[in-house]
Amino acid sequence: MQIDLRSDTVTRPTPAMMDAIINAKVGDDVYKEDPSVNALEAYVAQLFGKASALYFPTGSMANQAAIKLHTQPGEQLICDKWGHVYNYEGGGVSFNSGVSCKLVDGNRGKITANLVESAINPPDFYHSPKTSLVCVENTTNKGGGACYEIEELKLIYDVCQKHGLGFHLDGARIANALVAKKQDPKEFGKLFGTISICLSKGLGAPMGTVLVGNEALMQNAMRVRKVLGGGMRQVGFMAAAGLFALQNHFERLEDDHEKATELVKMLDQQKFVEKVEKQETNIVIFYLNEEVNAQKFMHNLNELGIRISDMGEGKMRLVTHLDYTDEMHDFVLNNFKKAYPTF
Ligand SMILES: *Cc1c(COP(=O)(O)O)cnc(C)c1O
């Protein structure tokens, strides 16, 4: 049995999702004539109460397009030091938009209204870049799946309003946050100018992210997507998988979160584990005891058929997902201790 807990991106379409893919009605989406893409965009726009939505091949491209829509070259955005847009999108912020990042020192990838307020450059001080956008992530990736309280986001929203800043949500795992916190997507829709929602993480579609936003901001979105090389043709097969995922795999994220909580309890009992980070959704981060040889630990886990992510310096990550079955979970709970038996 191979058990892959490296990421929630490793899932494969279920038979029911394959049916949705095979039966999808398609057309040329660059002409806006793909009924399955149009249906997906309408569904996500309505879910978040936004005027407009556009389907992108990847989350990075959706974030990059959003940043372009909110900014002009030479300007600056504010995000957490662990932000995906800063760390994991290949430097796209500067490459695509000519924008720099002002990093703030948040907690588990989450930032606060106060941090944002103090990071804004004075608008009349022409020596420094003009601050024009704030990007937050929910749930946070590097922060171990941490979720925002809606109250904190409202405070950040107020700061953005006061200073005329755009507000973008990298919602790669927003579905996990909504389920974990029992929040209403329309509340998020009210606060953000743009939101990216990933369909290929916990929701389990093979690809795709939808960017939703205000009408005025999204006016240029088709052109920006085209510039980035993201105009696709009969992509309704994949959009149908995305819509299927939203309609059938949303509520079940609760199962992933429960399994993650049980993994935390199991890890807490292992002598080779120094510390387990607070877990809120489907991501579990733990640190190996100083005396543990990480390479040997990973080797032993591989022998057991269990794959996890080594994030360096003893930091390890597990992510639960749709293809992590009850049977696999029992195996991991019972056998993980064998990963470092001599300890
Ligand atoms: C996965 C992820 C993305 C998008 O990644 P792609 O691989 O480009 O789809 C964006 N933001 C966060 C926080 C993510 O975890």
Image (cartoon, rainbow, N blue to C red):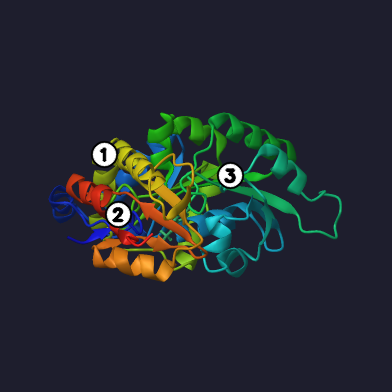
Towards the viewer: 23 or 95:
95
- Closer to the eye: label 2 or 1: 2
Q: Amino acid at mark 1?
A: Gln
Q: In the orientation shown, which residue stands out farthest toward the front?
A: 342
How packed mark 2 is, by other alpha carbons closer than 10 Å (few <14, some 14-19, many 20 or more), is some
Type of the residue with mark 2: Phe
Q: Secondary structure at mark 2?
A: helix
Please tell me which of labels 3 and 2 falls first in the chain: 3
Give the numbered dot on residue 336: 2
Name the side, left or right, on which 336 lies relative to 113.
left
- In this orientation, does residue 181 appear? yes
Query: Mark 2 CB in 8 Å range of ligand 1?
Result: no
Quadrant holding the C terminus: bottom left
Frontmost of labels 1 and 3 is 3
**Tag 1, which secondary structure?**
helix
Residue 95 coordinates in the image, percent (x, y): 59, 70
Residue 74 versus residue 25 in the image, above or below: below
Mark linked to residue 247? 1
Q: Which residue is mark 3?
A: 110
Q: CA distance from mark 3 to mark 2?
A: 31 Å
Q: Is mark 3 within 8 Å of ligand 1?
A: no
Which quarter of the image is occupied by the N terminus? bottom left
Q: Is residue 331 left or right of residue 111?
A: left
Q: CA distance from mark 1 to mark 3?
A: 28 Å
